[in-house]
Image: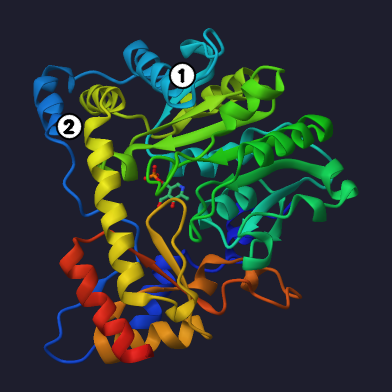
Amino acid sequence: MTGVFERFGALPDFPFRRLAAMLAERLPPDGVPVLDLSIGEPQHAPPALLAETVAAQAGTWNRYPPPGGTPAFRSAVAAWLQRRYALPEGMLDADRHVLPLAGTKEGLFLLPSVLPAKPDAAILLPNPLYAVYLGGAVLAGARPVPLATTAATGFLPDLDALDERLLEHTTAFFLCTPANPQGAVASQAYLERLLRLARRHDFLLIVDECYAEIWDEAPPAGGLQAAAATGGGLDHLVVLHSLSKRSNAAGLRSGFIAGDSDLLARFGRLRAYGAAVQPLPLMAAATRLWQDEVHVEANRAAYRAKLDLAERRLGNRFGFYRPAGGFFLWLDVGDGVAAARRLWSEAALKVLPGSFLTMGSVQPGLEDDPGARYIRLALVHDETTIDGAFDRLIEVLG
Ligand SMILES: Cc1ncc(COP(=O)(O)O)c(C=O)c1O
């Protein structure tokens, strides 16, 4: 096996570094303030209880936080999951089925490194994807296999197209629902089918539910509901949730992983060696945030209003559709890289080309890059700012 650094050398730079390099080639127009819709960093204010709780816990900064988190954090999470997904009483044991993460990014990155081995191990990834899944698969020395998620597949991996032989080599399947970047949501039936496949072929189903609380019409189904419906406990399943988008707290670096107790035991062992651990005052704030839904409802309403605005302003331009979840627009502009360059150099508008979110460039032979025609816009600013961004978008791209 080649070294980690050599394997990483084969990857493109992380999408935002690539974007910075591309935009550095040209200057935006003089005197036009930059509008940045490229990154999914919420600009709504975090709830006051975050800072209040951190201040109230100042007496615990001297302590090393436990990598497994506090019992209060784990039980707040288990109680939230049970309420949110109407799980049967007793299905989740807060001590065996929940671990905190210093942001879900680190969990997604390290998880592939604790999977039981298989010969010629493959990790199946949606394409386009959150690039961290790819980095994690490569770190672990597994073969990343892209599953194109296009308009034709409903922007989710097509389960009918999976090759049985490939599944025998598969150690993990990453699913993102609501999907970043397209906002598609997997139904409970889809999740149940995928979980059955995971059990039949002995791979781990990793469901990234980072955007689960930002939804338009109906709350997205979750992996744990599929587990409740199929029986068999939490075997072969983990779900990951984050406070970054739900509570506008990306800087808190707080999320959790819940699911398969054997996998979590392995993961806990790995993390105890050196993973980032969340400080106690921050974990206390995270605990409070999982106990409060008022700020989450307000947040959701603010995103809905921005989707209304997008619908009014864009109509059916650029293949606009209203995403079922998340806060991204995935717009078909013909050539995403060319459009992103023009929006920057002609209107100081930063957006992410869809091809920076795909595995196109690391999978030679992949003919159709499913992101090539698209740009991704993050609706994270206030309505007035977003309205101004739509002005620029329409002026430049028509
Ligand atoms: C799909 C997806 N998953 C996970 C994350 C990581 O979130 P965090 O590490 O802030 O919890 C992001 C961040 O943008 C994301 O888009």
Residue farthest to the right, as pictured: 165
- Secondary element under disc 1, as helix, strand or loop, is helix
Looking at the picture, does residue 362 appear above or below residue 44?
Answer: below
Q: Which amino acid does label 1 sit on?
A: Gln
User: Which image quadrant: the C terminus?
Assistant: bottom left
- Image check: 179 left or right of 248? right
Q: Out of 89 and 17, give the one closest to the viewer.
A: 89
Residue at position x 16%, y 68% from top? Answer: 384
What residue did someone put label 1 on?
82
Q: Out of 137 and 217, give the one closest to the viewer.
A: 217
Looking at the picture, does residue 308 appear above or below residue 55?
Answer: below
Q: Can residue 27 be seen in this view?
A: no
Q: Where is residue 48 in the image (x, y as percent from the top left)?
A: 11, 34
What residue did someone put label 2 on?
50
Residue at position x 58%, y 19% from top? Answer: 265
Q: Where is residue 110 in the image (x, y as percent from the top left)?
A: 54, 39
Q: Which amino acid does label 2 sit on?
A: Leu
Residue at position x 73%, y 31% from top? Answer: 116
- What mark, if any, has residue 13 been given in the picture? none
Q: Which of marks 2 and 1 is nearer the N terminus?
A: 2
Instruction: Give how far apart the Cα atoms at labels 2 and 1 are.
Output: 23 Å
Residue at position x 39%, y 86% from top? Answer: 341
Q: Is residue 242 visible?
A: yes
- Secondary element under disc 2, as helix, strand or loop, is helix
Q: Out of 393 and 341, give the one closest to the viewer.
A: 393
Q: Does the residue labelled 2 lie within 8 Å of ligand 1?
A: no
Q: Do the residues labelled 2 and 1 touch (CB within 8 Å)?
A: no
Q: Where is residue 282 in the image (x, y as percent from the top left)?
A: 24, 29
- Image check: 309 left or right of 123? left
Q: Position of residue 180 (x, y in %)?
A: 49, 56
Q: Out of 385 and 10, give the one closest to the viewer.
A: 385
- Image check: 144 left or right of 182? right
